[in-house]
Amino acid sequence: MSAFNKYYSILESNKDIKQQYKQNNPEDEIPEKSKQIQEMNNPIDIRYGYQDKSSLLFQINKKFPNQPDFKIGVDLIYLIDISQSLNDESLEKIKSALKCLVNYLSDQDRLCIVTYSNKACQLFPLIPLSEKNKLKIIKKIEQITIKKENSNIYSALQITLLSLELRQFKNEITNVNIISQDQDLRKYSNDFKEAFQNEQAFKLKVFLLFSQDLIQFCQKKKRESQKFGRYHIMKKFDQLSSLLCFETLKLQQTVILNLEIRVKTHQNNPIQISECSGGKFIYVSPYEIRIKKKLVSIGQNKPHLIGIGNIPKSEGGEICNIEVSFQQIHSNHHQNYDIPIYAQSQKNNILDETVMVQIYKLKSRSQMNEAMLYYDPYRIQDCIEILQMFQSEVADLPDGIKQQLNVEMQQFELALSQYKHNPAQQIENPFTKIDQQSKILKLKVFDKL
């Protein structure tokens, strides 16, 4: 039995605690109904990028109705670590971010805040964000103070699970967020998985507010993808307000649940893993990969670029099949359909320039990363060759595609120049700053809240 299971079993056996919790939490306040989105029958389609005698590259896209104002209700529970690991400045940033979130949320959303140190305290139960409730919530947030005690995440999880278990009404999406400066929080990943294993349409996110020293420490441990939930390590606390709102917006615009895409090829057409890029996928075999996503929202999804062999099994036969399974947000029914992939009528080369631009934008980043990885001041030529090979590849592309890759190619020119003139100096990856700037622009819309 895990540490969490032992801890929670005490609560399960103590009916007085549950009864007391029920008395302190009256009947659920039902939020306003959310706007319905139109029916989606085939949310996944294919765009073909490139074909030659040995390869076919295509892009898997998610196509949704144009409803930018569409939002569903979300049940949000925030666990705030107020133990001695937190300092006064960080607490003020957290309180400011929570108040910003309250102003952003609508009356179809519900919010609950739990503070914890050695013990946990629920500031208020899950309640809709009506104007009256917003005033109460902001007052409660302003009263949060630091406790000079150790941190006990289990006590906060107990209250959270009771909140989820005893709610009579349930919004379409449930979201639990933890905000902490506790660097050891990641070791509880298995406990988080166990605690929320029965939750459907659910997302857990952990915001770790770390100093620069701890950022460097965490960068040495890069196996977060294998953990339950998502850990967002932050060094700029000023972005916390906008980030909480942005992450909530993605949940509010969820249109599909439990999406699974299986790409299956024939034995003479293996998947060319080196050509696959974009969103994450699960490798099953040389002839099958899977793409899984529990929550899919409008406009917040990476395309998947897939490369496969290009030898038809028979004359005019398919070379690959894509199986799609998904559930619409307001339905319990799973829908399934297949997309057969055939060799394209154009025998050679580029089929869709926009797909090719996407491929080379992603490839520019992976090649720059590889050059950084191979950096050695005594073997700088290896690094230079990687950069030059990518330049040569782009040089052979049509002018229309090259023009759309100007930003990427400028970074390669600059990197080559710096390595040639000062091989003893490792450079920073220029795409880190460029891509970070793109993320900041997405958050700016929430700055005035």
Image (cartoon, helix red, strand yellow):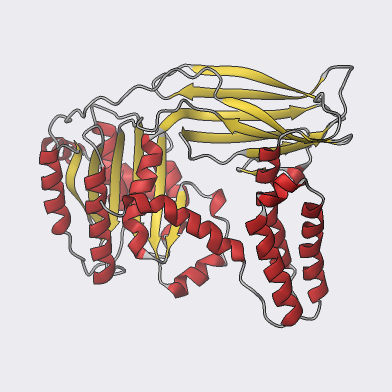
Looking at the picture, tell me which residue is in the foreground, 130 or 430: 430
Residue 181, horizontal then vertical, whole percent: 36, 64
Residue 423: tell me if it is visible. no
Q: Quadrant of residue 195?
A: top left
Q: Residue at x 39, y 46 (%)?
A: 247
Q: Quadrant of residue 148?
A: bottom left
Residue 139, horizontal then vertical, whole percent: 11, 52
Q: Residue at x 14, y 37 (%)?
A: 25
Q: Is residue 269 left or right of residue 358?
A: right
Q: Is residue 180 left or right of residue 212?
A: left
Q: Residue at x 64, y 40 (%)?
A: 281
Q: In the image, is residue 118 above or below residue 351? A: below
Q: In the image, is residue 166 above or below residue 180? A: above
Looking at the picture, tell me which residue is in the foreground, 133 or 20: 133
Residue 321: tell me if it is visible. yes
Q: In the image, is residue 419 above or below residue 193? A: below
Q: Residue at x 54, y 24 (%)?
A: 43
Residue 61, horizontal then vertical, whole percent: 60, 32
Count the labels in the image.
0
Residue 77, horizontal then vertical, whole percent: 29, 44
Looking at the picture, tell me which residue is in the foreground, 413 or 371: 413
